[in-house]
Image (cartoon, rainbow, N blue to C red):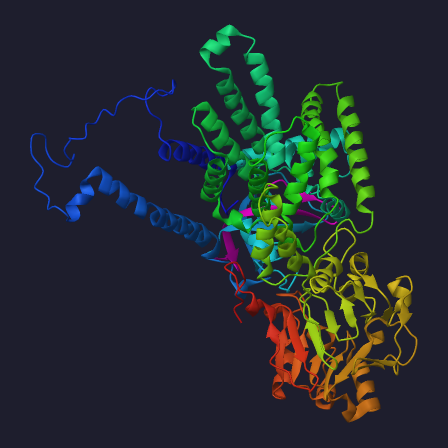
């Protein structure tokens, strides 16, 4: 939802969109409710209303502009203008919406500066053992007691112990913010795109502070204000947790009832992704349609049994009214999330057409729903769910619309699942690089099962408000756990969700045509060509380094380090970035997607310089997604990874003409940064030096031991640019052409420090920082030539990309 847009605005926009689309595009004719049509009350001979009564229009020159006033000419002219005018209006509306998010951004100069903000909690807070995370609508902000021009939605984390927070409450908070910023890498999730689509302008943390003459980190107003719906949903979530929290530890009841999925863990989402069942848990189009369908069916059954009711309002119309109310109510329970807005608008259009007795072709209804969704929130096009939901409906219309309905519902249902999977194959490959091949079979059984469970969950949740009737809720929670455990077992099966490398751009439309051919009726000539057209999507291989070539990618993992080195014979990962078991993990979220996008499923060697969390935290996540043939570290005992061995100075190997050599440590000891593996890579007279977090003591030892032999083309700065590394003597010995820093944007340590940058600048060495550049890529050819390193943040500029003020 865009910044500052509450649930009431969303509801009003949805209703206005429905009325505009159904009345203006297909205006009703009197008598309205009988569906009849009267003769047009305005005669063709009627003069233009701009002239006074009794006067005549001036003569119009035949063949001139005056001919446009004629009904037929004006109709043709208006039809020609309609499409470009509508397109212009759409682009204008999208620009206005984007300006609300892009105008007056949070300034880079105030990143991580102490601020005082006032505003309201805009959504249900997500509470974990480490922190409470919540959306906060900033109304006023000050810096050093001076007001700053910044308002909008921000995402905050309040580390424990944090007070109880409720949606809608007004607070004055001491915070540190930074602009909408996320890591920028060739593969994986675009975090800035997600934040932009959610209307978030900045992220930050609540700090403990006292301010002169001001109360901070205290509640100013407990009333909900415009966020009454969010507060109501939070009360429901609290009730479900109180009654069934011990059994429903995953929060499945909350997910199906109010769309709150914050309690689902990373492993749960992985299970849903691998089995293709995410749409069943997170409230989306299927959930809203299912609830509306249940209410429509019950209403029509009940209404048809009363002659008085049917005389008052026809049964189909009564069902449509109740269905619209049910859809609105359930979407409201879900907080009018983007995923529910799409389904809600589509249902309102279809049921509205049924009520007003309008005949809508399926594709017409789909198009109107598409327009309605974009009118409510143009940024929804940035959500993957937008493309998947509309794509799935379009595929079903294309596939089922050309076939006669079958009596065997299970066969037809199974074929529909197969059709959706095949039709969305190109889109799934492009968006996720992963396709669940078992999804059709799982959904064949899971969708009917959850079609029963969903109304059951809502019913028992309602009954649980009555004292003494909580047992059905507990039984339902246990049943949901059993279903989730079954999906988790299926997710452990091998090869059910193969990953595919990122295909070339030209394969996308070709595969789309191929899928359409395969879904076409059997009698279509050349239908078999669909298989041929799909093959490039799944068989095209990415480029590989040639013999003697060296490709280095320094990934953007925030405040940490992760580098991928590719050769013709093998792949090496040096450090795995930060990570936590139930939170963000660089190994699974950044490194693995980069490798899999290039069809690298096996890493020949992983070097974890030392066991600090910002270098080793992603190892477990990486191991879950790709095969790690060998793991080495300067602190293998502290690393505690099965099979890890120690790196020692003098060890070397050769891959297709590229030479690798450890320069440190010389002895087996575990002393944190001082134990960091130092790796040198050489090819064709060029070299790269990776030092982990080696401090200046290690640097002096290296200079004493190797001297001028340390000279390298590229140095990845030690300890992210800390004063403890990159000493003057070491820089003099290495003499790098480039120094790469791997540091987080606006990090609390202010790495790289000004002192280090000054030492490097004094030697006229060129630098790049992942905080500013995103992932940094360098390719050294077999003859030693290499171009200027590429900066991914500049390679992938989008409307939502953070332009950093240097």
Residue 20 percent location from the top left of the image: 39, 35
Q: Main secondary structure of the magenta part?
A: strand
Q: Residue at the location (69% across, 72% down)? A: 553
Residue 738 percent location from the top left of the image: 65, 82
Q: Nearer the viewer, residue 790 or 107?
A: 790
Judged from this view, the residue extending furthest toward the bottom is 708
Residue 371 visible somewhere in the drawing: yes
Q: Nearer the viewer, residue 574 or 359?
A: 359
Judged from this view, the residue extending furthest toward the top is 307
Residue 211 visible somewhere in the drawing: no
Is 730 situated above or below 205? below
Q: How many numbered tags mark residues here?
A: 0
User: Quadrant of the rendered structure where residue 276 is?
Assistant: top right
* Residue 676 counted in the magenta span: no
User: Quadrant of the rendered structure where residue 212 is?
Assistant: bottom right
Q: Residue at the location (76% across, 45% down)? A: 271
| Magenta-drawn segment | 121-148
């Amino acid at each position: 939802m865009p910044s500052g847009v509450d649930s009431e605005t969303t509801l009003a926009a949805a209703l206005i969109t429905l009325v505009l689309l159904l009345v203006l595009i297909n205006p009703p004719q009197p008598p309205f409710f009988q569906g009849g049509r009267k003769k047009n009350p305005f005669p063709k001979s009627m003069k233009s209303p701009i002239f006074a009564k009794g006067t005549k229009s001036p003569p119009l020159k035949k063949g001139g502009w005056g001919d446009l006033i004629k009904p037929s000419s004006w109709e043709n002219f208006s039809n020609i203008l309609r499409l470009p005018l509508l397109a212009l209006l759409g682009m204008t509306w999208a620009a206005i919406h984007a300006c609300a998010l892009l105008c007056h951004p949070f300034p880079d100069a105030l990143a991580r500066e102490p601020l005082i903000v006032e505003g309201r909690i805009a959504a249900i807070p997500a509470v974990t053992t480490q922190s409470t995370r919540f959306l906060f609508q900033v109304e006023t902000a000050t810096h050093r007691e001076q007001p700053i021009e910044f308002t909008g939605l921000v995402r905050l984390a309040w580390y424990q112990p944090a007070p109880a927070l409720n949606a809608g409450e007004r607070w004055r908070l001491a915070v540190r913010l930074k602009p909408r910023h996320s890591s920028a890498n060739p593969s994986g999730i675009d975090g800035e795109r997600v934040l932009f689509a959610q209307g978030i302008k900045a992220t930050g943390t609540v700090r403990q502070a006292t301010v002169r003459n001001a109360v901070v980190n205290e509640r100013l107003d407990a009333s909900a204000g415009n966020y009454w719906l969010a507060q109501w949903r939070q009360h429901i979530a609290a009730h479900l947790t109180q009654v069934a929290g011990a059994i429903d530890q995953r929060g499945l009841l909350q997910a199906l009832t109010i769309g709150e999925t914050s309690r689902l863990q990373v492993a749960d989402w992985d299970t849903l992704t691998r089995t293709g069942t995410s749409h069943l848990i997170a409230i989306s189009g299927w959930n809203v349609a299912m609830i509306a369908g249940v209410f429509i069916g019950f209403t029509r059954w009940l209404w048809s049994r009363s002659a008085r009711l049917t005389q008052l309002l026809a049964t189909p119309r009564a069902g449509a009214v109740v269905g619209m109310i049910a859809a609105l109510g359930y979407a409201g329970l879900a907080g009018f999330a983007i995923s529910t807005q799409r389904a809600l608008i589509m249902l309102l259009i279809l049921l509205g057409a049924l009520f007003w007795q309008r005949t809508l072709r399926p594709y017409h209804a789909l198009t109107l729903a598409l327009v309605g969704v974009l009118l409510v929130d143009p940024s929804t096009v940035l959500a993957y769910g937008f493309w998947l939901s509309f794509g799935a409906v379009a595929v079903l219309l294309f596939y089922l619309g050309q076939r006669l309905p079958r009596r065997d519902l299970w066969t037809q249902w199974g074929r529909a699942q197969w059709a959706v999977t095949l039709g969305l194959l190109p889109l799934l490959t492009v968006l996720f690089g992963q396709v669940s091949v078992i999804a059709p079979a799982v959904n064949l059984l899971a969708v009917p099962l959850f079609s029963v469970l969903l109304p059951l969950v809502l019913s028992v949740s309602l009954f649980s408000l009555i004292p003494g009737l909580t047992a059905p809720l507990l039984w339902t929670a246990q049943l949901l756990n059993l279903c989730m455990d079954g999906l988790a077992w299926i997710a452990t099966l091998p090869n059910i969700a193969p990953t595919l490398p990122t295909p070339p751009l030209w394969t996308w439309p070709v595969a789309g045509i191929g899928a359409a051919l395969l879904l076409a009726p059997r009698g279509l000539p050349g239908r078999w060509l669909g298989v041929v057209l799909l093959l490039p999507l799944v068989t095209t291989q990415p480029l590989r380094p040639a013999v003697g070539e060296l490709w280095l990618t320094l990934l953007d993992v925030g405040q940490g380090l992760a580098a991928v080195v590719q050769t013709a014979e093998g792949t090496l990962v040096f450090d795995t970035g930060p990570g936590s078991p139930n939170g963000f993990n660089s190994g699974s979220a950044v490194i693995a997607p980069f490798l899999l996008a290039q069809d690298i499923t096996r890493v020949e060697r992983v070097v974890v310089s030392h066991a600090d969390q910002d270098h080793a935290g992603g190892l477990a996540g990486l191991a879950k997604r790709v095969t790690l043939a060998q793991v080495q570290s300067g602190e293998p005992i502290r690393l505690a990874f099965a099979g890890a061995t120690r790196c020692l100075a003098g060890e070397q190997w050769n891959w297709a003409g590229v030479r690798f050599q450890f320069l440190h440590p010389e002895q087996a000891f575990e002393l944190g940064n001082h134990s960091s593996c130092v790796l040198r890579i050489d090819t064709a007279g060029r070299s790269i030096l990776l030092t982990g977090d080696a401090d200046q003591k290690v640097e002096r030892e290296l200079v004493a031991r190797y001297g001028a032999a340390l000279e390298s083309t590229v140095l990845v700065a030690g300890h992210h640019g800390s004063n403890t590394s990159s000493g003057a003597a070491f820089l003099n010995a290495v003499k790098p052409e480039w120094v790469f820093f791997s540091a987080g944007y606006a990090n609390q340590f202010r790495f790289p420090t000004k002192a280090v940058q000054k030492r490097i600048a004094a030697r006229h060495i060129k630098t790049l920082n992942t905080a500013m550049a995103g992932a940094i890529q360098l390719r050294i050819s077999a003859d030693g030539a290499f171009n200027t390193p590429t900066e991914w943040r500049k390679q992938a500029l989008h409307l939502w990309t953070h332009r950093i003020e240097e």
